[in-house]
Image: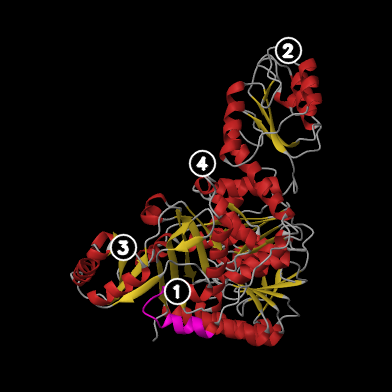
Amino acid sequence: MLFDPESVAVIGATPKEGKVGYAILNNLKNFKGKVYAINPKYREVLGFPCYPSILDAPEVELAVIAVPAKAVNPVLEQCGEKGVKYAVVITAGFREAGKEGAKLEKEMVEICRKYGIKLVGPNCLGIINTHNGLNATFASTQPKPGNIAFLSQSGAFIIAVMEYFKNTNEGFSKIVSMGNKAVLDEADIMEMLKGDPYTDVIMLYIEGINDGRKFMDVAEKVGRVKPVVAMKSGKTDAGAKAASSHTGSIAGSYQACFAAFRQSGVIPADSPEDLFDFARLLSKYRDVGGGVAIVTNSGGPGVMAADAIESYGLKMASFSKETIEKLREMLPPEANIYNPVDVLGDADAERYVKAVECVADDENVGTIIAITVPTARLSFEEAARFRINKPHVICFMGWDKSDFFDPVRAVRALSSLYQYSKFRRRGEKTYREFSFDRNRVREAMKSINPFDILKVIGIPTPEYGVARTADEALEVADRIGYPVAMKVLGDIMHKTDVGCVKLNVNRDEVKKAFVEIIANAERLGDVRIDGVLIQKMVEGGREVIVGMKRDASFGPLMMFGLGGIYVEVFRDVTFRIAPVSEGDAMDMIREVKAYKLLKGVRGERPSDIKSIAEVIMKLSQLSLEFPEIVEMEINPLRVFESGCSALDFKIRLKSKS
């Protein structure tokens, strides 16, 4: 196996200090298996037997390659002939280095496919298994054994993390620097770690994901067994500037990755601090139920924690009558016996411990944040001696053995536990399948009017027609009935801003409105104009947006949010990867701030939320069945007390080369 080989060969080993081949071999001194050096110049290196080539060595399971880039593939070919099944290529100078390097990496992949070699790298730091002494890296730090596996696309970040943890009592089970991910990627490594008895949580640092679908499938399966915490760098997406819809301009690779995390149960971290905090907590605890209880000897930090609990979407625990009575009996009259419990600044460790244990016995309490500040009356060491069997974090402000100094940070860490617990309790997803006539959809895609597509897939629209002359416009409007809305058809963005939309048009205004719309469109220069769309004017309801942008890694990325002209201003939106289940669609709607409006405020009747969910799911299915759709967007989708109606629809298809 990759992490438990019986024998390791370092190709490019050298006795010269400062060289990568020296550092790797030196780091393998504590490995419990056999180690061979490969270099034609020597017979022995650092006490290990040395062979001219891998072909001359005894049987080898894992080859660690640290030779110049142009020599890697010939060496890898020899590994294949030798029967080596696992390889780690430390060497840089491949895809990351330009055209020639990319060609070498392609050849590398072909060699691995030919011989069935599972390869980590190239351009990586290496791999570590702390439980058998396997340190096949050139790092200068030996990490302590622990129960957290750490996978990173950045080798430099791994070195920094190992250095950071060096002076703590914490350690790692496995460490993998993935580098260019030419063969094995994070999904492959996670699958290997799923059954690893030494790993309780997997921590990821990701810069990009090549196969999003594979990642989601593996992450969800692994996440059912052990938590996966991930930090994704690169929140900005310059490519979105070229998008042709609101969805395209807002949706980027980070949004796709974050949506994928959420759907597959991966706990997202926004910073290295969160990454470590979440992994530490999830390495101790799994499931949690009930609210959060705070016990403190100082009101201020207790209020900080309470505020953070609401900010992070958690709930304060409501104590039972029995708990309140017990607290009343054991605490001074001035103490606060409700959540957060304040035992007061004159409390000694005994009073504090009793309060924590009392609160922990309450069945309404799921987790506890134990907060203290230093006083002459209270010893941190003694105050930490409470015995409880529920998940908890210690926030003893000023104590070097505390989990956290900052109460807000403690709450943020706890939120990861609640997220993971919610994922574990989530049942099987239900996907609705709508009956689309694929041939009719393809015919509708050829139409100049994108509304024809919505009509075929059963998304309600106002009655409409297309006019190419002013006289045709009057005929269409007479048939539809007044007032009407009129808008240009063609490849024009933000039609309202350039005078290409007219609303509440009456019969005597139709011809004039048509002429003005066409004239305003023609002033824009070289743009396609297909006529004017005329629709029955629709009043009332709430405006939302439903859109899709195809992500290079994850496929169709669905968006929902507050619609109309303010979508890019307020960006009250949320995302999911298609296919979108019924539960996913409802969660998308609940997540936006506009949900409060959709539920009805100040006596207003609620909007038909189920009809929105159906639109989201229909566009999700459409995007999967027709991969030529690059972007599409209904904005606004007007939602009423019963039903909804798509007032504007844009779609962009893949250009034919």
Does residue 275 appear left or right of residue 512 in this picture? right
Seen at 33% across and 64% down, the residue is 484
Q: Residues within 10 Å of mark 1 (few under 14, many from 20)?
A: many
> Secondary structure beneath disc 3?
loop
Which residue lies under the disc numbered 1?
630
Quadrant placement of the N terminus: bottom right
Density class for disc 2 (Cα within 10 Å; few <14, some 14-19, many ≥20) is some
| Label placed on residue 94 | none
**Viewed as shown, does residue 561 lie left or right of 132?**
left
Distance, label 3 to label 1, CA atoms, is 19 Å
Q: Disc 2 designates what residue? A: 332
* Residue carrying label 4: 601
Region in magenta: 439-452
Amino acid carrying mark 3 in the image:
His
Q: Position of residue 329 (x, y in %)?
A: 80, 15
Give residue 386's position: percent from left, percent from top. 79, 29
Identify which residue is drawn at 45% across, 67% down.
Answer: 461
